[in-house]
Image (cartoon, rainbow, N blue to C red):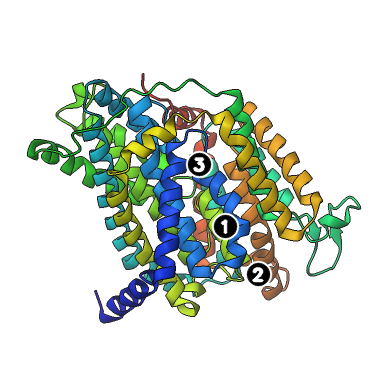
């Protein structure tokens, strides 16, 4: 490491360790754990609901809190997966396979300890990777022109289709729908109203917060009310949180492998925590000498996916911070929070606002430390939260959603619009259309249009600029190759099988 990196990290540590930022970091990780523990709530819906609050916060404090909610939810999701076989987070589905079996055997404490320690190790390693690889990546990105940025965003959208669950046609349709929503409003160049249908409230475009809170907030509420299940606690008191030497030895290699795999997959658009946890579990099942015990209470089956999902969650910050490209819905919301604060996402953040960038990076390690210190002693509290019926929670959530959206522009139109998107989110889920590609299309669409216009302006209207520049051409070629592979039936079947949970 050079001295400049040490200097930046020290500056980031000083920023993150200020009393205000420590408080917001603590609030973020506690809220993240709580919403991870409560089945039916997730970081996407929670961050969407909290976006209006970030208006009044300093930018670095707002981002530190929202980031804490994201990676804190990965910790909390494992608690319900282990105790009641009901994952609080989709990335904790695999953890339930062995974690709940360990709880049935009276080893719930050891399963929770393995999950917490694996997550802390993965979070620490990934924070170091972000610090190491973000500066050179941002330096390369600073040399990108409009053509390269347009091609990069096309590649990001194609990758989100490749890695999306379910039907390929549904994923493509959702991206197109998101792109169409993104162009609603007044065109900044021609001053022509597009797709407003004479509604004056749409002249400024559709508010990102309204879409996010509707589709992910209200949509989740409706689905969870429909599918509310009885929760029976396997244990009411958790003991035996200390691992012995053999158990530490058993989880060491799986945690390292899960961390590395999660760090790689987390960078990919559409990857992140969920894909990382599935891949890590599948990898351990193949390489472990204890493979026969997987699904029967193997501690490796808890440690590996928990390390992977936390590494995947934090690694997804790399493309968001350095390129301004969201790799999953949470990162799209983080970009929305940056735009709300008047910050242009991309490589310029590191040079123009170094305290914000390095403060956020340093806060990730502090937040992970807080999570280990808080989570194990507070297991009793999380156990009690699990027993709260969801139908008692949803009215409060809906009130917060309505207040948050109304506060954006003090108009009831946004509240009604949010309700419409909430119904749309419910319909999407019933039709098995994953809403994440839509949100990525909605965020990236206007940016893609702007970069394409700039590229064509510089090339005097010639579209050949997109393929005449080597980096742009390479990214478009990769995107075309990725689309070609998922159109092949054999490979498409393989892609869908990845997301089929083993019985």
Dot 2: within a 10 Å radius of its alpha carbon, few (fewer than 14), some, or many (20 or more) residues?
A: many
| Residue 172 visible in the picture | no
Q: Nearer the viewer, mark 3 or mark 2?
A: 3
The residue under label 3 is 42
Task: Find residue 172 and report its horizontal and vertical position in percent.
Answer: 63, 40
**Looking at the rendered structure, which numbered label has been put on residue 299?**
none
Relative to 374, is 171 above or below? above
Q: Locate the C terminus by quadrant.
A: top left
Task: Find residue 324 and report its horizontal and vertical position in percent.
Answer: 53, 63
Query: First in sequence: mark 3 or mark 1?
Result: 3
Dot 1: within a 10 Å radius of its alpha carbon, few (fewer than 14), some, or many (20 or more) residues?
A: many
Q: Disc 1 on helix, strand or loop?
A: helix
| Residue 343 visible in the picture | yes
Task: Find residue 284 and report its horizontal and vertical position in percent.
Answer: 24, 34
The residue under label 2 is 455
The residue under label 1 is 153
Depth check, front residue: 419 or 377 = 377
| Marks 3 and 1 close (CB-CB < 8 Å) | no
Q: Locate the N terminus by quadrant.
A: bottom left
């Amino acid at each position: 490491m050079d001295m400049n990196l040490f200097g930046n990290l020290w500056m980031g540590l000083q920023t993150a360790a200020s009393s205000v930022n420590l408080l917001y970091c603590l609030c973020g990780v506690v809220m993240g754990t709580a919403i991870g523990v409560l089945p039916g709530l997730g970081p996407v819906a929670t961050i969407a609901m909290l976006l209006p609050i970030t208006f009044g916060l300093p930018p670095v404090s707002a981002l530190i809190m929202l980031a804490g909610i994201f990676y804190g939810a990965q910790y909390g999701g494992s608690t319900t997966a282990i105790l009641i076989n009901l994952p609080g987070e989709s990335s904790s589905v695999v953890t339930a396979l062995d974690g709940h079996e360990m709880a049935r055997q009276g080893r719930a404490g050891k399963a929770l300890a393995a999950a917490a320690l694996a997550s802390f190790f993965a979070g620490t390693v990934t924070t170091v990777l972000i610090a190491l690889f973000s500066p050179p990546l941002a330096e390369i990105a600073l040399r990108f022109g409009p053509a390269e940025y347009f091609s990069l965003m096309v590649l990001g959208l194609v990758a989100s289709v490749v890695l999306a669950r379910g039907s390929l046609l549904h994923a493509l349709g959702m991206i197109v729908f998101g792109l169409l929503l993104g162009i609603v409003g007044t065109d900044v160049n021609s001053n022509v109203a597009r797709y407003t249908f004479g509604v004056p409230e749409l002249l400024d475009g559709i508010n990102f917060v309204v879409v996010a809170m509707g589709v992910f907030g209200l949509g989740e509420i409706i689905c969870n009310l429909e599918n509310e299940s009885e929760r029976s606690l396997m244990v009411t008191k958790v003991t035996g949180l200390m691992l012995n030497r053999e158990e530490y030895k058993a989880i060491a290699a799986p945690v390292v492998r899960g961390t590395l795999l999660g760090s790689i997959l987390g960078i990919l658009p559409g990857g992140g925590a969920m894909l990382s946890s599935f891949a890590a579990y599948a990898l351990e099942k193949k390489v472990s000498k204890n493979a026969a015990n997987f699904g029967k209470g193997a501690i490796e089956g808890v440690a590996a996916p928990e390390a992977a999902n936390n590494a995947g969650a934090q690694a997804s910050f790399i493309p968001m911070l350095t390129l301004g490209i969201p790799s999953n819905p949470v990162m799209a919301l983080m970009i929305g929070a940056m735009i709300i604060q008047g910050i242009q996402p991309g490589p310029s953040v590191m040079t123009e606002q170094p305290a914000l960038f390095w403060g956020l990076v340093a806060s990730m390690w502090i937040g992970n430390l807080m999570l280990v210190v808080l989570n194990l002693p507070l297991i009793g509290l999380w156990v009690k939260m699990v027993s709260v019926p969801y139908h008692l929670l949803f009215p409060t959530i809906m009130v917060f959603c309505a207040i948050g959206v109304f506060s954006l522009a003090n108009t009831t139109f946004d509240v009604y619009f949010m309700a419409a998107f909430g119904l749309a989110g419910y319909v999407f889920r019933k039709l098995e259309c994953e809403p994440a590609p839509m949100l990525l299309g909605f965020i990236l669409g206007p940016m893609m249009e702007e970069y394409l216009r700039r590229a064509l302006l510089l090339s005097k209207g010639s579209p050949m600029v997109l393929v005449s520049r080597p980096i742009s051409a390479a990214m478009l070629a990769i995107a075309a190759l990725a689309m070609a592979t998922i159109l092949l039936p054999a490979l498409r079947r393989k892609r869908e099988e990845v997301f089929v949970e083993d019985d």
